[in-house]
Image (cartoon, rainbow, N blue to C red):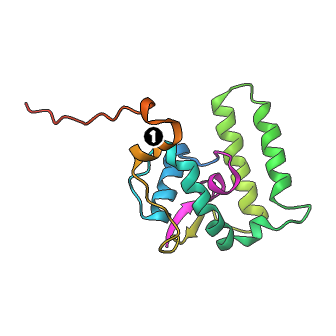
Amino acid sequence: MKLFHIGDVLSITTGRLVSPSHMDGVCSILAFMTGDDNLFTHALPRVADECKPWLRVQYPQLFANDWRGLALMIEALDKACKETQGDKKLLDDICQFWCGEVARTYKLPMEIPVEAIGEGMHLRIDPVEEAKAMIGDDKVIPISAIERRD
């Protein structure tokens, strides 16, 4: 178990990037949950799909299908974000305020405990092979890092 900002959890479960540490928060929670620290950007949607059901099990109160639920809060967030006209600071402020509102509404702290997913729930795929499968062999050019000697 490890504590994560509620925005990290909501980023995975809602598909909205509301983590205060942005993609670093997304990568951090997914790496923890899967035990896979070799996650490349193109794998994040697949890995988030693996983790999302487990997060929903851990926090079922967030995902009840009542009319007052998180769905209405997401609609309000989407509307507010569209009105920022590209102002990144305002967008970030809106997302953080929204995370606080979710925490208050559902009586959760801003840092919430997350359990890793179970064995066999994460498919480890070589990042280069996954990229090739996604966009084609001929469009992926692996580059090896060369160690610099001074």
Q: Which residues are magenta?
A: 1-17
Looking at the rendered structure, the number of numbered marks drawn on it comes to 1
Q: Position of 82 compared to 9: left or right?
A: right
Query: Does residue 1 appear to the left or right of 112 in the view shown?
Result: left
Q: Can residue 33 be seen in the rendering of this structure?
A: yes
**Which residue sits at x=73%, y=49%?**
98
Q: Is residue 119 above or below residue 80?
A: below
Locate residue 88: give its quadrant. Answer: top right
Measuring 54% from the left and 61% from the top, which residue is drawn there? Answer: 4
Image spot of residue 118 (x, y percent):
51, 74
Where does the image place residue 35, in percent across and percent down from the top left?
42, 64
Q: Which three-letter amino acid code belongs to the residue tagged 1?
A: Lys
- Picture residue at 69% right of the left edge, 44% below the top: 95
Name the spot of residue 1 as percent of width and height, x first.
Answer: 49, 73
Residue at (64, 47) in percent of width and height: 18
Q: Is 2 one of the magenta-colored residues?
A: yes
Q: Which residue is under mark 1? A: 132
Indicate left or right for 61 with 124 as reference.
Answer: right
Would residue 106 be seen by someone viewing this image from the given angle?
Answer: no
Q: Is residue 85 above or below residue 110?
A: above
Position in image of residue 52 (x %, y %):
63, 61
Residue 9 lies within the magenta run: yes
Secondary structure of the residue carrying numbered label 1: helix
- The quadrant where residue 142 appears: top left
Q: Dot 1, crowdedness within 10 Å: few (<14), some or many (≥20)?
A: some
Name the residue furthest right. Answer: 67
Q: Nearer the viewer, residue 41 or 85?
A: 41
